[in-house]
Amino acid sequence: MEDHTEHVCIICGQGKEEGISILSQFICEACESEMVQTDAEEAKYHYFIHQMKRISLQVNV
């Protein structure tokens, strides 16, 4: 039996079924794929870092 529960991605804010969870926060497959392919020199990289910091902020609350 497959889990078809929709989760909200912490990166893009969209509801998706497939992805990974990090410290109870969800990252969809599309964002995960884009994150690992983004060069550190690109502006989008800094956006991903900002969004990922939200995970640690929510854990420390």
Image (cartoon, grey):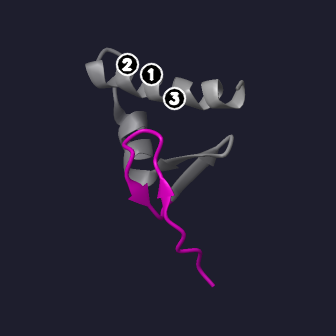
Quickly name the residue at label 2. Answer: 46
Q: Nearer the viewer, mark 2 or mark 1?
A: 1
Residue denoted by label 1: 50
| Residue 38 rendering spot, x and y as whole percentages | 34, 30
Place of residue 17 in the rendered image (x, y in percent of width and height, measured from the top left): 47, 64
Residue at which label 3 appears: 52
Q: Residue at x 61, y 48 (%)?
A: 21
The answer to whether residue 22 is left or right of residue 11 is right
Rounded to the nearest whole Å, what is the CA distance between mark 2 and mark 1?
6 Å
Residue at disc 1, secondary structure: helix
Figure quadrant of residue 50:
top left
Residue at the extreme top of the image, as rendered = 41
Tell me, yes or no, whether the highlighted magenta stretch contains residue 8: yes
Mark 1 and mark 2 in contact (Cβ < 8 Å)?
A: yes
In magenta, the rendered stretch is: 1-18
Q: Earlier in the sequence, mark 2 or mark 3?
A: 2
Residue at the right extreme of this rendering: 60
Q: Is residue 33 left or right of residue 43?
A: right
Asked if the residues shown at circle 3 and circle 1 are in contact, with their CB atoms under 8 angstroms apart, the answer is: yes
User: Predominant secondary structure in magenta?
Assistant: loop
